[in-house]
Image (cartoon, rainbow, N blue to C red):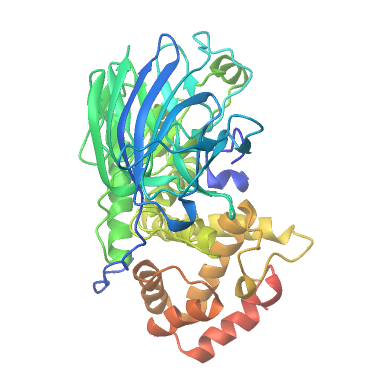
């Protein structure tokens, strides 16, 4: 991932009718389980871990990654037997993490480690990004990208097992509250956190307040009632739209996390905001109250906030209930969430708002001077960048809806949710046919909108 990536997919542009029930999502491949304990001290930047991983993918049992600032003391298998490893000398590197190669594969792996990181109590670091293990003097922030927990690693595909179920004890000296992605935040300096759903595991420990409603949790910032109500109301509306359309209740609700970045002085001077989403967490450096202000003010600023929140909430379906894999990974994960967000924007903010958003997407694509990868020829080598994920592929899904109608498109989206990730175009077509899209309509859409990576339907 790129440092300081923009908060909103809409920044690239910055530029639901009641329905029948849906089959339960297909059984997903077994996911790793992360257990053990982590201790940290926000006054010193010290981190210690004694963490085990089990139920590992077969192709990822011979290596793991860990943040380059963390030093491995011991590695053992599930029975406590020591396991030899390489990684001290001339180590492999995967982004923020060092790659460790085991002497022999292990289905379960335990790693003891310790490290320490710089403190920036004046918030005057040269930069900050999602992969940092960030200590700002009164809080600590670690995301899955930082590899603060060991993650199984497939060296051939260079893919981390960054999502995991977990059962973790966390102790944080100096913290007044603790939060792990997918578990309720707790007050205090220690707690045990569990998730039976595979999650990208984010940790935040800080000193600020916690606000809870039925719809949202707000961490590290106090907001007046009117602003909390604005956020809660929007989240409820999005949840209602998504649930009706996908035929499955949206069980997660977002946690809005206000963070003070390591370089907050520079950001305040520039008037810039930065953030990221690790569902169900939406983290931002600026005030969460700014989001509520936009929602209360109405207009295009409110529309963009609605679309963004709806996009992130779409990841409950594509990312949590269904964990995409294979060559269509980015389309299933991000483009599907973007498509759902546009539908929610239309229902919540009106046709004009959705049409304006779609027009901005199309104008962005129209500036491209060369074709994008053809949707019917995607394979494991295809480079599907942000333009493809957030702009082009959502427009393709909208064009399919226009050709086959809302009812069949809804059935198709529910089919994608219920099915294993398609590995090729033929499997994607099979899902479409089961949704009631006939072969002629599918081929007509392919020929007019998909073939050759055309920026507009012919």
Identify the residue at horizontal 24%, vertical 39% (top origin). 194
Residue 458 image point, x, y percent: 68, 79
Residue 129: percent from left, percent from top: 56, 30
Q: Residue furthest left?
A: 214
**Image quarter of residue 393:** bottom right
- Residue 437 position in % (x across, y down): 44, 84
The residue located at (23%, 26%) in the rendering is: 191
Left/right placement of residue 431 relative to residue 232 reads: right
Nearer to the camera, 131 or 395: 131
Report the front residue among 350 and 169. Answer: 169
350 w.r.t. 440: above or below: above
> Number of labelled discs?
0
Q: Quadrant of the N terminus?
A: top right
Residue 220 visible in rendering: no
Up-down relation of residue 381 to residue 142 (above or below): below
- 113 or 345, which lies in front? 113
Residue 52 shows up from this direction: yes
Task: Tell whether 252 sits left or right of 84.
Answer: left
Give the residue furthest to the bottom: 440
Seen in the image, is 360 located left or right of residue 57?
right
356 or 119, which lies in front? 119
Q: Give residue 386's position: percent from left, percent from top.
A: 61, 51
Residue displayed at 27% across by 72% down: 23
- Residue that protrudes farthest toward the right in the picture: 369
| Quarter residue 81 falls in | top left
* Image-quadrant location for residue 418: bottom left
Compared across the picture, whether 37 is left or right of 125 comes to: left
* Relative height, residue 242 to residue 132 (above, below): below
């Amino acid at each position: 991932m790129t440092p300081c990536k923009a908060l909103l997919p809409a920044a690239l542009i910055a530029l639901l009718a009641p329905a029948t029930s849906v089959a339960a999502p297909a059984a997903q491949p077994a996911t790793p389980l992360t257990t053990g304990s982590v201790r940290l001290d926000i006054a010193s930047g010290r981190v210690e871990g004694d963490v085990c991983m089990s139920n590992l993918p077969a192709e990822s049992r011979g290596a793991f990654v860990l943040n380059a600032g963390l030093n491995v003391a011991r590695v053992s298998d599930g029975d406590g037997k020591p396991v030899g490893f390489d990684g001290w000398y001339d180590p492999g590197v995967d982004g923020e993490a060092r790659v460790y190669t085991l002497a022999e594969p292990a289905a379960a792996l335990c790693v003891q480690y310790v490290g320490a990181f710089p403190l920036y109590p004046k918030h005057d670091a040269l930069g900050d990004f999602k992969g940092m293990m960030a200590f700002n003097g009164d809080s600590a922030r670690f995301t899955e990208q930082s590899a603060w927990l060991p993650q199984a690693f497939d060296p051939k595909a260079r893919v981390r097992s960054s999502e995991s179920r977990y059962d973790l004890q966390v102790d944080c000296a100096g913290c007044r509250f603790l939060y792990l992605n997918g578990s309720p935040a707790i007050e205090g300096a220690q707690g045990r956190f569990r998730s039976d759903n595979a999650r990208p595991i984010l940790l935040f420990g800080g000193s600020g307040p916690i606000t809870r409603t039925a719809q949202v949790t707000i961490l590290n910032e106090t907001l007046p009632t009117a602003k909390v109500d604005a956020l809660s109301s929007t989240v409820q509306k999005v949840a209602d739209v998504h649930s009706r359309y996908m035929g499955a209740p949206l069980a997660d609700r977002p946690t809005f996390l206000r963070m003070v970045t390591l370089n907050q002085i520079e950001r305040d001077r520039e008037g810039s905001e930065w953030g990221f989403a690790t569902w169900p967490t939406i983290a931002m450096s600026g005030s969460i109250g700014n989001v509520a202000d936009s929602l209360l003010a109405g207009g295009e600023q409110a529309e963009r906030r609605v679309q963004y929140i709806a996009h992130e909430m779409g990841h409950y379906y594509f990312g949590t209930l269904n964990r995409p894999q294979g060559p269509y990974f980015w389309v299933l994960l991000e483009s599907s969430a973007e498509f759902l967000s546009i539908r929610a924007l239309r229902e919540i903010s009106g046709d004009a708002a959705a049409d304006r958003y779609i027009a901005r997407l199309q104008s962005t694509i129209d500036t491209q001077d060369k074709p994008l990868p053809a949707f019917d020829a995607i394979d494991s080598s295809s480079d599907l960048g942000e333009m493809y994920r957030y702009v082009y592929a959502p427009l393709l899904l909208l064009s399919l809806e226009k050709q086959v109608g809302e009812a069949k498109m809804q059935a198709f989206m529910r089919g994608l949710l219920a099915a294993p990730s398609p590995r090729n175009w033929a499997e994607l077509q099979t899902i479409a046919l089961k949704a009631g899209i006939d072969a002629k309509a599918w081929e007509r859409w392919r020929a007019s909108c998909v073939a050759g990576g055309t920026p507009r339907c012919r």
